[in-house]
Amino acid sequence: MTTLYGIKNCDTIKKARKWLEEQAIPYQFHDFKTDGLSHELLSEFVSKSDWQILLNKRSTTFRNLSDEIKENLTDDVMFNAVLEQPTLLKRPLLSLDNTIHIGFKKEQYQELFA
């Protein structure tokens, strides 16, 4: 089953969901704000990708982190920060065929679902 992870009011999530629906591709949507982000799920993301790719350093949430956290970006520090504030993750995260795809580009999704 295809799962799309993010937050429902994110513009990029809206575009990804619209594209999936227009293509009649079945998927589940997991909203971090309402469905949460568990330790296990975040561990799965980290095992399939790299922190440098997963972490949205351009987000307001990241910019609002304390300097202490931003200056000590160890795996443990970031893991705990993301558990507390899932909006630190780039969006959307698409789980497909036991892999994670980050972001939404129409061309990328067309290739994935070809």
Image (cartoon, helix red, strand yellow):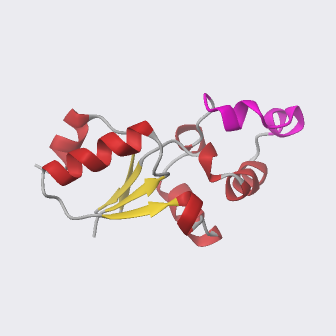
On the image, the x and y values in percent for residue 53 come to 52, 39
- Of residues 18 and 25, which is closer to you in this image? 18
On the image, the x and y values in percent for residue 109 come to 23, 43
Q: Name the residue: 47% across, 42% down.
A: 10
On the image, the x and y values in percent for residue 34 come to 56, 64
Magenta segment: does it hold 60? yes
Q: Name the residue: 72% across, 48% down.
A: 78
The number of numbered badges drawn on the structure is 0
Q: Name the residue: 47% across, 44% down.
A: 91
The magenta stretch is: 58-72
- Quarter placement of the N terminus: bottom left
Taking the image as shown, residue 101 lies to the left or right of residue 62, namely: left
- In the figure, residue 72 lies in which quadrant? top right
- Residue 103 visible in the picture: no
Q: Residue furthest front?
A: 9
11 up-or-down from 46: above or below = above
- In the figure, residue 63 lies in which quadrant? top right
- Residue 106 visible in the picture: yes
- Of residues 60 and 58, which is closer to you in this image? 60
